[in-house]
Image: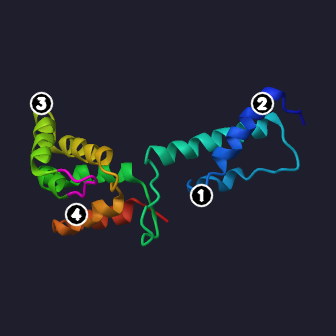
Amino acid sequence: MRNIEPNNHIVCTLAFSLFHDNRINTQYRKLFIPSLNFVDINTVYRWFLAGVYCLYCYKSNTILISANGEDKHTYHLAEALRVTAAEVGKNWTTLYRKLPFNPPRDKSNLDYDIEAIDWTRSTNTEYKDLAYKGLEKWRKLSNKASTNALIRTLNSMKKQSIAQQLQRTVIIT
């Protein structure tokens, strides 16, 4: 085993702190359990990559850990947005208006958002592309954006088939 050079201690500290961040989903850490009996540069590098990947997933909401304690699953929000956009079709404006925004957006802001997205439409643009742009805007503007919130909104719109499809295809247990 190689000893870590002084400059690499910083990398090791950063990797270890990122890796052991309790906010990050444990399923991404379980493959990289560090052995504290020895430390070589390859181990540190592996810790660092695992930590950066976990932090990226957490910060980008690619893997979303539900904020409220009632949810028992981890959801893959990006895939949920793609599935919903493909299925919702012309009803994307109704869905956008009913999505929970936090901080709340008033009707004029919602109308402006819809007009801005619709204005970018060319003759070849499909409704699923517009729906995806709207769902992405919701994800960026709302701190309540989650797969559960999307499923609840779809159920309130009587779109149970899309909600059930999300539950079957997107939920990671």
Q: In whole angstroms, how far apart are the C-alphas of marks 2 and 4?
A: 50 Å
Q: Position of residue 16 (x, y in %)?
A: 71, 45
- Per the image, the residue denoted by label 2 is 8
Q: Which mark is residue 154?
A: 4
Which secondary structure is most common in the magenta stretch?
loop
Task: Specify the amino acid type for callout 2.
Answer: Asn
Q: In whole angstroms, how far apart are the C-alphas of marks 4 and 1?
A: 28 Å
- Within-10-Å neighbours for mark 4: few <14, some 14–19, many 20+: many
Q: Earlier in the sequence, mark 4 or mark 1?
A: 1
Q: Residue at x 35, y 59 (%)?
A: 147
Q: Is residue 104 magenta?
A: yes
Q: In whole angstroms, how far apart are the C-alphas of marks 4 and 3?
A: 27 Å
Span colored in magenta = 99-105
Q: Is residue 29 above or below residue 8?
A: below
Task: Specify the amino acid type for callout 3.
Answer: Ser
Task: Specify the amino acid type for callout 1.
Answer: Gln
Split into 4 quadrants, where in the image is the N terminus?
Answer: top right
Q: Earlier in the sequence, mark 3 or mark 2?
A: 2
> Of 68 and 162, which appears nearest the observer?
68
Q: Earlier in the sequence, mark 2 or mark 4?
A: 2
Q: In whole angstroms, how far apart are the C-alphas of marks 1 and 3?
A: 42 Å
Q: Secondary structure at mark 3?
A: loop
Q: Which mark is residue 122?
A: 3
- Within-10-Å neighbours for mark 3: few <14, some 14–19, many 20+: few
Q: Position of residue 84 (x, y in %)?
A: 26, 54
With 31 as the anchor, is 60 left or right in this view? left
Q: Is residue 159 magenta?
A: no
Please identify, in this view, whether the residue under mark 1 or under mark 3 is nearer the observer.
Answer: 1
Q: Which mark is residue 27?
A: 1
Q: Earlier in the sequence, mark 4 or mark 3?
A: 3
Please identify, in this view, whether the residue under mark 2 or under mark 1 is nearer the observer.
Answer: 2
